[in-house]
Image: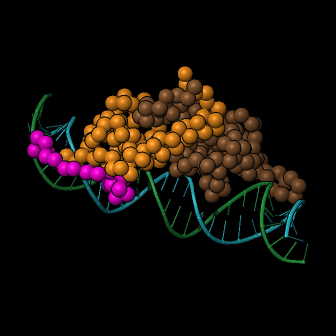
Chain colours: A brown, B orange, C cyan, D green
Amino acid sequence: MAVNNELFKGTLQTIILNLLSENERMYGYEITQKVKSITQGELLLKEGALYPALHKLEAEGLLETTTEVVENRLRKYYSLSNDGEKEVVNKLREAKDFIAQLQLLLNLKPSF
Amino acid sequence: MAVNNELFKGTLQTIILNLLSENERMYGYEITQKVKSITQGELLLKEGALYPALHKLEAEGLLETTTEVVENRLRKYYSLSNDGEKEVVNKLREAKDFIAQLQLLLNLKPSF
DNA sequence: TTATATACATAAATTTCTTATGTATATAAA
DNA sequence: TTTATATACATAAGAAATTTATGTATATAA
């Protein structure tokens, strides 16, 4: 039932940035659960992929973090920086182009 | 002008199989040119990606080859095997699912 | 004679992701 | 009570796909 994860390679940064553009701030575990619920369990975002990706986006200055302790557990909240706000626009345009080109190449009509 | 090639990671096998399901037989260089023309130069399929991918699909029994010399140059024609004919159906369904899920995750409407 | 196009191929390096492992708290189930 | 599951972070080793670079060879246009 799960989708072919292989195909999502390269889309993770865009997915993260887009979720943060819609949600103000989110913590890592929350992102994994959000992806799971949006895709109805079809795409499972692995921790080994997510956390390094978050760290990389932070290192590039696209994300900012604040740490809180909630119910005796650590939470590291991520939000978009100013650069992140700009970059998410680019990434979404790239994703749209990508989908359009892929549909052309695979002779797939857009799903009405 | 070129698309973000990063996003096409994982889609190469599907693209190759689909082109061969539409064209009976093609040779490697022809595939690179076909991808270029379909995407109007936005996606450039590198030889270092294409040839290993073709060899892998052949090793898996999804493609068959015949070699010809045309205008004093070697051409290696690829065509779908019976298994390849079946697999292209699966790959295209996976690609459709992938696009649908990605549009959900990125909150993108299908492009009418 | 130089660059470009055609046509194949592979090796090294890079990037991204999976799998596995580790720490730690809380709670539900057996 | 101890086992499994959920929450919450993190990183290391390995696998896989791709980019970049390089190589061979012929034909043609500049």
Span colored in magenta: B53-74
- Asked which quadrant contains residue A84, the reply is top right
Residue A42 vertical position relative to residue A47 in the rendered view, above or below:
above
- Asked which quadrant contains residue B105, the reply is top right
Residue C3 position in % (x across, y down):
20, 37
Is any part of residue B78 visible from this angle? yes
Residue at (57% x, 25% y) in the render: A112
Is any part of residue A59 visible from this angle? no
Residue B26 position in % (x across, y down):
27, 41
Nearest the eye: B32 or A107: A107
Residue at (63% x, 58% y) in the render: A48
Residue C17 position in % (x across, y down):
56, 53
C27 relative position to B24: left or right: right
Residue at (65% x, 51% y) in the render: A44
Residue B3 position in % (x across, y down):
45, 34
Nearest the eye: A15 or B72: B72
D10 relative position to D16: left or right: right
Taking the magenta stretch, the answer to whether it contains residue B64 is: yes
Residue at (49% x, 34% y) in the render: A98
Circle count: 0
Residue B87 vertical position relative to residue A87 in the rendered view, above or below:
below
D18 relative position to A30: left or right: left
Residue C28 vertical position relative to residue B43 in the rendered view, above or below:
below
